[in-house]
Image (spheres, rainbow, N blue to C red):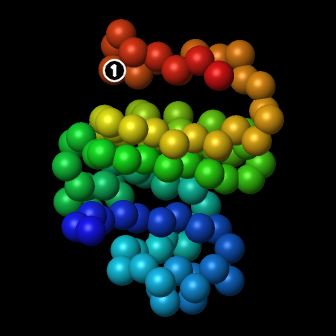
Amino acid sequence: MNYFGIGVELDSQYAEEWNKNRKSPLINTDATQIDYSALFLQHNLPKVIDFLSVDTDPPQISLLCLKKIMESGYQFNVIDFEVDRLIIDQTIDYAGDKYLKF
């Protein structure tokens, strides 16, 4: 496959396994503190990204990360977002007329 990804992981114990199995970089930091616009620009990502996966624990952190990523100015064709039974009655305004309701 010809794709590029960026992983973000707070726990450094996963870095060795990541680096052994993937060519994509792993950023070892708190995903809620990243400037995603700067990160995507640094890695020369296109303004429309095919796939985004957000999976953090607890689920409230996933929602916070997703909001920050959506504010980056980038668009995503597909978003995989794990909520772990968390029921969120909230609307996220994205790209004007599109929204996600959890």
Image height check: is 76 above or below 29?
above
- Badge 1 amino acid: Ala
- Quadrant for residue 98, please give it: top left
Q: What x and y, as percent, mark residue 14? A: 63, 80
Q: Residue at x 78, y 33 (%)?
A: 86
Image height check: is 26 above or below 76?
below
- Quadrant for residue 45, please give it: bottom left
Which quarter of the rendering shows the N terminus? bottom left
Image height check: is 94 above or below 18?
above
Q: What x and y, as percent, mark residue 25? A: 40, 75
Q: Residue at x 33, y 20 (%)?
A: 95
Q: Give the left or right position of residue 41, taking residue 35 as reference.
A: left
Q: Residue at x 57, y 89 (%)?
A: 16
Q: Which residue is mark 1?
A: 95
Q: Residue at x 70, y 38 (%)?
A: 83
Choose between 79 and 15: the one closer to the eye. 79
Choose between 66 and 34: the one closer to the eye. 66
Q: What x and y, as percent, mark residue 74? A: 30, 39
Q: What x and y, as percent, mark residue 96? A: 34, 13
Q: Give the left or right position of residue 71, taking residue 11 as reference.
A: left
Circle 1: is it few (<14), some (14-19), or many (20+) Cα within 10 Å?
Answer: few
SS category of the residue bearing label 1 = loop
Q: Give the left or right position of residue 28, taking residue 83 as reference.
A: left
- Quadrant for residue 42, please give it: bottom left
